[in-house]
Amino acid sequence: MSEREVSISVRNLIEFILREGSIDSGFMTSSRAVEGTRAHQKLQKINEKEFPKYQSEVYIKMRIPYKELNLVVEGRIDGVIELDGKKVIEEIKSTTRDLSLIEEDYNRLHWAQAKCYAYMHCEEMGLTEISVMLRYFSLATEEVKSFTKEYKKEELHDFFYDILDKYYLWAENTLKWEKERNSSIEKVAFPFPYYRKGQRELAVASYGTIKEGKRLFVQAPTGIGKTISTIFPSVKALGEGRASKIFYLTAKTITRSVAEEAFQRLKGEGLKLKVLTLTAKDKICFCAGEASCSPEECPYAHGHFDRVNEALFEVITKEDNFTREIIEEYAQRYRVCPFEFSLDLSLWADSIICDYNYAFDPRVYLKRFFDNPSRESYVFLIDEAHNLVDRAREMYSAELIKSDFLKLKKLMKGKAPKLYKALGEVNSEFIALRHLCEELGEVFHVSEKEPGDIYKPLRIFQREAEEYLSKSAGTEGYEELLDLFFKVNSFLNITELYDSHYVSYIDLSDKEVRLKLFCMDPSHNLKQAMKRAKGEIIFSATLTPIDYFQDILGGDNQEDYRMKLPSPFPEENIHISVAPISTRYKNREQTYEAVLNYIYTFITVKKGNYLIFFPSYAYLKEIHRRFSERFNDIPLLVQQEDMKEEEREAFLGSFRADNPDTLVGFCVLGGIFSEGIDLAGDRLIGAVVVGVGLPRLNPERDILRDYFQKEKGRGYEFAYVYPGMNKVLQGVGRIIRTERDKGAALLIDDRYLQGSYEKLMPQEWLPYKVIRSSMELKEELLSFWDMVE
């Protein structure tokens, strides 16, 4: 008997081999899975009373020697009934459709799944014949419609093995690839002639963490080679069977390209690995903004499932790099939806490079992997992890706005009386929330209690909207209702997570009524989500202070590992100056001229490329206006709000090492150009940071300050100082990218001299030079550049 083994569930086997037809995602709800489970449970309880010999959720598993390998097929039978000495396999399907529209041949996949279970049960119990009962449960009326067929074991055997014949090609290809992949992993070496300082320690620690199934928090300076130092040991663990898939998780598109390059470098050393980069649906969709995901409007949705398996087999047998360009090429050739195609490809990829959302967001995480984790050992490599704090707060929070309901109420008048009434009830609850704030004399009202009074009206709206959406595609207001339905669905899902880490608030600013469930501390939710992986490496150049990030990212001080690595580059290659003047809002008018003079001096001592970071667009625009009036002979580039991808690339592309004149880029600290970009060598020789990067004062930040003051005794630090200094560290980190880079940084703000800020500075910044005038800055920089050149 072969030791080569491939496992698959009955449901996945059927849905993969027999799928056909078109994508129609005009209306789908993530709550359906929960509703379906409840429907199963209701019907199963009824059956327990109706049938004396009834078993529900019967686990079944077959190991089948098939040609040159073992196929392990498993699943759970909804119900096994013994009636008059005969066995009946029950398959339950919930539906929102009118039962009168469902006939016996409504869905061949439903019968196929039940027939596979029936054959497996016959084989297990030694039966020669069996019945299959397919039952449809109406979610709207709770009525049931049943169809029953009788089968001989021989008929079921032929059907089952016909499915396996079609699947064998895929299973054989998978095992062949894994053997080839693992052989290459065994031979592949670290893709550089030597390890940088700290790089070997990080690689060894990462491998050990994965091996032990633990979690590692790493602060590793820019330039140490964090990406390759985490990917390389993860790949080794994959080849040894200690991991089944690597997820490289990040927040920014630019960082994903760095991971792609690291995998490519290993492939240059002989590694064979299938690597997928997932691109957001709105970016990769061929019909974005032009058509809905329905077969009537999108040619790539029409007949997608008829063609997708052929496309999949070709791409996985011919390609190893599933980049956006490759996915789009094959999707165009076979006329399939590129986004759904990429999700299918994820099942065949060894490593997936994707956004944090796909692992952590309760709305969109990859359920195909993480809802069935029993046999899998996933590795999470979480890059630029400092970004995960605010991103997690967004993922686990939810907001609704009164005007959305009022607008739809007007649209539905005279069309759908029940939906109209439901919208009116929700709108009334928002009016009550507004009255509460007015009675309290507050524009912004915070409460630790849930806004429970609105939950019931929202659920009624959800039910009525679901019924309307299932029948009224293409009508006026349909898209707006669909959008609101999903917002409400998300909001109600977040209510399931609401606990002491949350507050709710009502915001009456901008002549609007907003209700938000705000996750102040995402640590608990992240801790649960981290369990989807066997091992996690959580790393950033600016995980400072590390105990703060370990705490708020769901770490465990007793169980987790952590390490802080020094810079691998000579400290004398960077010069840090601090100009202690106030950039606080109340003092800006008095210090604009001083800031201008410092910036001008900094960029004119040596010809080169510079980035100037400001705390806000308003500050940037004011300094830019003044600078252009006084110094119009220096080329300036200015970051604009909502820049398109090609505009960002053009901005960065202007920073060439051979620029004939000095080039200065004005940017916003914490924005797209202050982290995750590589301008090595003479592409960037200096940076100025104006201010200390504090997040803008707003009610949410004050909520965080009060919460963490109560919980940790460090409210202002958690809400303002740590996030702010993180942005500063990232901005300055753009200067030194390799061991040959040399550069200078100027920090303009008197708060840098305070202990609470100074202690967050990396070792290589110390001792920094305090300068009191532009002339002193000029002398310092002349001395530095003279020394390093």
Image (tube, rainbow, N blue to C red):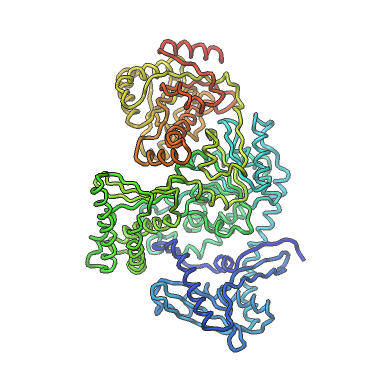
Question: Is residue 729 among the parts visible in the rendering?
Answer: yes
Question: Is residue 325 among the parts visible in the rendering?
Answer: no
Asked if residue 613 is positioned above or below residue 534 in the image, the reply reads: above
In the depicted view, which residue is nearer to us: 295 or 212?
212
Residue at the image position 38 percent from the left and 64 percent from the top: 296
Residue farthest along the right direction in this orientation: 1
Percent of width and height locating residue 128: 66, 84
> What is the quadrant of the N terminus in the image?
bottom right
Quarter of the rendering containing residue 604: top left
In the depicted view, which residue is nearer to us: 596 or 220?
220
Residue farthest along the bottom direction in this orientation: 84
Is residue 445 shown left or right of residue 766?
left
> What is the quadrant of the C terminus in the image?
top right
Asked if residue 524 is positioned above or below residue 419 in the image, the reply reads: above
In the depicted view, which residue is nearer to us: 363 or 659?
363
Is residue 673 shown left or right of residue 454?
right
Quarter of the rendering containing residue 584: top left
Percent of width and height locating residue 689: 43, 25
In the depicted view, which residue is nearer to us: 4 or 218?
218
Quarter of the rendering containing residue 229: top right
Is residue 270 shown left or right of residue 554?
right
Percent of width and height locating residue 353: 55, 46
Asked if residue 717 is positioned above or below residue 501 in the image, the reply reads: above
Percent of width and height locating residue 502: 42, 49
Count of marks placed on residues:
0
